[in-house]
Image: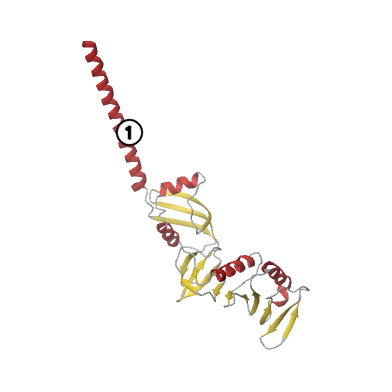
């Protein structure tokens, strides 16, 4: 009998000890989770980014919108090579300055174009997603006109009446990027024909058929026509490589 009582007491003590260990573990894990959640809330973002299209407040606003609000998780994921997706940036490094502050260094995703509406510039990326809204005009980014707009909303794709028209504009912007053209404007008309404007020259590329051939042909004659004030018709690919510039004054010149 005594042996049986001793065994029962031992079992009770083991159960109590096991329960205590279990509760301590649960409390410790809960405390760690709470510290991670509430002890590392992102409040301040410092940046060192190239080419300098965004302000620290714009980066912080994006992170707030996307729910990127934990400094420790942001830092750890960056350290292990599984960085949190930030559409504003191509690649970046995170330095943990304090539980509430980080510094982000790296390279921004280049903005491709801008739509001007109500005195604001809506800057977008290669997919047509608006990543910046500002009163300021950024150097080297072409203005886009002619699209029939439904909605412009930051961190969302441009909403238009004709998706094919938007894609035509994006294709042209992507195509001209491989050349060192300083395009100031890209315009699309109601027939989905695209023109680019460089200095005082309008280059009519027409529809996006044979776009690559047209752009390479324009590259070959670039130095000859860039100073002209007129309209270069490249709506159709010329087999002999000759295209016509209709000067604003009324004279016409052929270029190869």
Residue at (71, 68) in percent of width and height: 213
Count of numbered badges drawn on the protein: 1
Coordinates of residue 137 in the picture (x, y in percent): 51, 72
Residue 46 lies, with reference to residue 73, above or below; the image says below
Residue at (46, 49) in percent of width and height: 95
Coordinates of residue 79 in the picture (x, y in percent): 49, 45
Residue 34 lies, with reference to residue 138, above or below; the image says above
Nearer to the camera, 48 or 26 = 26
Residue at (47, 46) in percent of width and height: 77
Coordinates of residue 162 in the picture (x, y in percent): 53, 71
Would residue 84 be found to the left or right of residue 202 on screen?
A: left
Would residue 134 be found to the left or right of residue 7 on screen?
A: right
Would residue 183 be found to the left or right of residue 44 on screen?
A: right
Residue 225 occupies quadrant: bottom right
Residue 2 lies, with reference to residue 73, above or below; the image says above
**Furthest residue in direction bottom, as rendered:** 250
Residue at (55, 73) in percent of width and height: 144
Looking at the rendered structure, the secondary structure element under dot 1 is helix
Residue at mark 1:
25
- Quadrant location of the N terminus in the rendered image: top left
- Quadrant location of the C terminus in the rendered image: bottom right
Coordinates of residue 107 in the picture (x, y in percent): 54, 57
Would residue 8 be found to the left or right of residue 99 on screen?
A: left
Residue 6 occupies quadrant: top left
């Amino acid at each position: 009998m005594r042996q049986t009582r001793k065994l029962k007491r031992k079992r009770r003590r083991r159960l109590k000890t096991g329960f205590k260990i279990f509760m301590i573990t649960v409390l410790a894990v809960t405390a760690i989770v709470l510290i991670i959640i509430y002890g590392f809330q992102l409040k301040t973002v410092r940046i060192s980014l190239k080419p300098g299209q965004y302000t620290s407040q714009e980066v912080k606003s994006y992170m707030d919108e996307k729910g990127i609000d934990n400094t420790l998780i942001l830092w750890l994921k960056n350290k292990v090579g599984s960085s949190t997706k930030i559409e504003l940036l191509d690649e970046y490094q995170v330095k943990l300055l304090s539980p509430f502050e980080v510094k982000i260094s790296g390279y921004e995703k280049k903005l491709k174009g801008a739509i001007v509406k109500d005195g604001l510039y809506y800057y977008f990326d290669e997919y047509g997603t608006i990543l910046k809204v500002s009163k300021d005009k950024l150097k080297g980014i072409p203005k886009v006109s002619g699209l029939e707009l439904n909605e412009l909303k930051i961190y969302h794709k441009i909403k238009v009446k004709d998706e094919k028209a938007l894609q035509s504009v994006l294709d042209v912007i992507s195509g001209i990027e491989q050349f060192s053209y300083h395009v100031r404007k890209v315009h699309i008309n109601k027939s989905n024909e695209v023109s680019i404007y460089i200095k005082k020259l309008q280059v009519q590329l027409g529809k996006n058929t044979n776009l690559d051939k047209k752009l390479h042909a324009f590259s070959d004659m670039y130095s000859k026509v860039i100073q002209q004030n007129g309209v270069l018709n490249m709506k159709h690919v010329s087999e002999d490589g000759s295209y016509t510039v209709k000067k604003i004054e009324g004279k016409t010149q052929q270029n190869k």
